[in-house]
Image (cartoon, coloured by chain):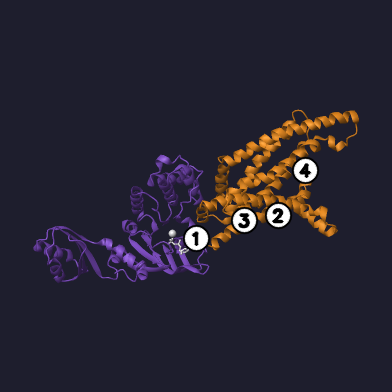
């Protein structure tokens, strides 16, 4: 436990003093500060016209659907590119700079190394998502918002990002090059969305059920609507566990190969 | 303290080390000497638990490196060929991190870090980023990191490589200071390094141990002879003959009109006899030294000798 904390703290400091992370935070703030007010303005116009016309469906007049959902899917899109940037160095840099030798000859297990690094990635992602959360939260000053729904929705996004982080950390453990790790991770992140798209493609109900279960999107949509489903939690947790376990195996194998 | 038995490592088809056997006692400083590619780093990586051997066992402090890697790693400080330093950390923070990683905690943490900094003379740069340090300083940070947990065993892979002569001398002094306190294995491909720091040498070539003994014994290894360097002002014609005629002298070679190399059987009074002969001869004795340095030749003979068809 203590060793995990030591590794976590070192990596977390690494994030804070790494220009990479600060650039990512700055970038996301800049983009959201431009996109979010625009979305709000569009929503306002929509309401104004609907007041006169009285024709829009009720759902679209809810700020949660009208603004926050778009905001969330936009954040999600950015996370596909951002999470790999945060995780790419975690193992590949250690291998390249030979600092991995230190970790592998210290009295820590491979699992402790992986968990410590994974948690630090989660902390960094948490910070990024918190930045995204501020925008809807600040909207509370001039609109009525349903906090519970909002928080659950962001929790869902965080879980999806946590799945990315586990996959991307695994990518980082496979290579010495941060760039290769980044590209591989982005491909991984995008492809899990394609797996989910199987739902719309296949016909047989059995295959449909399978795809529905392995679709990140299906599980996320529950959260986004503000409901926590255990199947979703279990699905995300098992993906995270799987990829952390694979990373641990890769590291353990590096002790035995050469 | 360290026991290595039948240790073998194969990289695919290539055998990097081949059935090594050696012991290192507590408090000993042992030099691992061999040309590049001999298998020094490979052996050290196995002892530190960095990688697994193909065959054989290694034990440190009574613990098997593979059955009990965590226990072994607690007891070892390791400097790999490339110092494992994080460029984006401050020297002091880095050493604190390593100490914690090795399990140092509480009040001793600061004490240990301070001591490592002091021993490696890093005080002036402890608040600097490692990436801004020169190569020599990085190497010192690497040594400090091996020392910082005050481990029983220190494994240093080519600790002075890439340093300037002054820094080399400092590191050698440091290693000499560690004698008795820590058990040290250091590897090098240069002989003077072990002569300056070690009590015992293990010479390794092509993955096999070709000699292991104390420094003193190795100097007379196999030849059973010693070499004396002699410098005279002006040699008379018959000096060579007269020296050769002395008891116990095996060979007399002049390398220049003034410099002579004399091989003699191992005996206490060779120098004395040679000296008095030179004076009797009126050649003008300038200098006479017993050639410890000839370990170099033995080393070359043992390692490169086979290929060169014997340098002797
Ligand atoms: N990772 C590796 N893969 C394949 N061969 C290796 C590897 N590491 C070392 N070798 C080979 O093993 C031999 C011993 O290497 P090494 O232990 O590094 O020697 P030294 O440290 O004495 O210079 C060399 O012939 C080297 O080419
Ligand atoms: Mg080497």
Question: Given the image, what chain letter belongs to the residue carrying mark 2?
Answer: A
Residue that mark 4 sits on: A224
Q: CA distance from mark 1 to mark 2?
A: 31 Å
User: For the residue with label 1, is its CB less than 8 Å from the closest atom of ligand 1?
Assistant: no
Q: Nearer the viewer, residue A179 or B77?
A: A179
Residue that mark 3 sits on: A247
Check chain identity for marks 1 and 4: say if they share one. no
Residue B77 circle label? none
Label 1: element kind? loop
The vertical placement of B218 against A242, above or below, is: below
Give the chain coloured purple.
Answer: B
Q: CA distance from mark 3 to mark 1?
A: 19 Å
Residue that mark 1 sits on: B49
Looking at the image, tell me whether mark 2 or mark 3 is earlier in sequence order: 2
Give the chain coloured orange.
Answer: A
Check chain identity for marks 3 and 4: say if they share one. yes
Q: CA distance from mark 1 to mark 4?
A: 48 Å
Q: CA distance from mark 3 to mark 4?
A: 29 Å
Estimate the x, y position of residue A69 in percent, counting from the top left.
77, 39
Check chain identity for marks 2 and 4: say if they share one. yes
Estimate the x, y position of residue B140 in percent, counting from the top left.
41, 48
Label 2: element kind? helix
Instruction: Verify CB contact (< 8 Å) between mark 1 and mark 4.
Output: no
Q: CA distance from mark 2 to mark 4?
A: 20 Å
Residue that mark 2 sits on: A238
């Amino acid at each position: 436990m203590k060793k995990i904390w030591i590794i976590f703290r070192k990596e977390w400091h690494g994030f804070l003093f790494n220009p990479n992370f600060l650039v990512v935070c700055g970038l996301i703030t800049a983009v959201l500060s431009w996109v979010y007010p625009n979305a709000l303005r569009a929503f306002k116009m929509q309401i104004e016209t609907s007041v006169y016309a009285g024709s829009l469906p009720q759902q679209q007049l809810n700020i949660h659907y009208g603004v926050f959902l778009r905001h969330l899917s936009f954040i999600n899109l950015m996370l596909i590119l951002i999470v790999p940037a945060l995780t790419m160095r975690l193992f590949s840099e250690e291998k390249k700079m030979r600092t991995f030798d230190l970790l592998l000859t210290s009295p820590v297990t491979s699992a402790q190394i992986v968990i410590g690094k994974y948690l630090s990635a989660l902390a960094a992602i948490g910070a990024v998502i918190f930045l995204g959360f501020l925008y809807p939260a600040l909207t509370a000053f001039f609109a009525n918002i349903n906090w519970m729904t909002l928080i659950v929705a962001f929790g869902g996004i965080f879980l999806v990002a946590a799945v990315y982080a586990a996959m991307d950390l695994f990518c980082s453990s496979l290579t010495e090059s941060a760039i290769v790790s980044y590209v591989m991770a982005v491909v991984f992140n995008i492809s899990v969305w394609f797996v989910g798209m199987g739902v719309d493609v296949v016909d047989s109900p059995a295959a449909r059920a399978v795809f529905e279960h392995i679709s990140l999107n299906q599980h996320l949509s529950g959260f986004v609507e503000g409901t926590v489903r255990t199947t979703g939690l279990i699905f995300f947790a098992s993906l995270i566990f799987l990829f952390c376990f694979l990373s641990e195996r890769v590291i353990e194998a590096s002790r035995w190969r050469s | 303290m360290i026991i290595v038995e039948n240790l073998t490592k194969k990289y695919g088809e290539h055998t990097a080390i081949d059935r090594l056997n050696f012991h290192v006692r507590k408090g000993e400083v042992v030099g691992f000497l061999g040309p590049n590619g001999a298998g020094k780093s490979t052996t050290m990586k196995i002892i530190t638990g960095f990688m697994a051997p193909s065959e054989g066992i290694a034990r440190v402090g009574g613990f098997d490196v593979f059955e009990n890697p965590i226990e072994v790693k607690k007891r070892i400080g390791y400097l790999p060929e490339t110092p494992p330093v994080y460029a984006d950390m401050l020297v002091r923070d880095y050493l604190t991190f390593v100490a914690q990683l090795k399990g140092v905690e509480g009040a001793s943490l600061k004490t240990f870090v301070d001591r490592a900094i002091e021993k490696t003379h890093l005080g002036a740069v402890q608040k600097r980023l490692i990436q801004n340090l020169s190569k020599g300083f990085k190497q010192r940070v690497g040594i400090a990191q091996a020392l910082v947990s005050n481990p029983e065993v220190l494994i240093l892979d080519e600790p002075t490589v890439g340093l300037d002569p002054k820094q080399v001398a400092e590191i050698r002094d440091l290693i000499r200071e560690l004698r008795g306190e820590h058990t040290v294995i250091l590897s090098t491909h240069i002989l003077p390094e072990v002569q300056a720091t070690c009590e015992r040498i293990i010479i390794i070539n092509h993955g096999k141990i070709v000699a292991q003994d104390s420094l003193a014994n190795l100097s007379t290894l196999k030849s059973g002879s010693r070499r004396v360097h002699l410098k005279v002002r002006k040699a008379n014609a018959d000096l060579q003959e007269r020296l050769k005629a002395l008891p116990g002298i095996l060979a007399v070679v002049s390398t220049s009109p003034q410099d002579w190399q004399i091989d003699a059987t191992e005996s206490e009074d060779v120098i004395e006899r040679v000296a008095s002969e030179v004076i009797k001869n009126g050649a003008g004795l300038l200098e006479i030294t017993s050639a410890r340095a000839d370990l170099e030749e033995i080393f070359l003979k043992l390692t490169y000798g086979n290929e060169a068809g014997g340098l002797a």
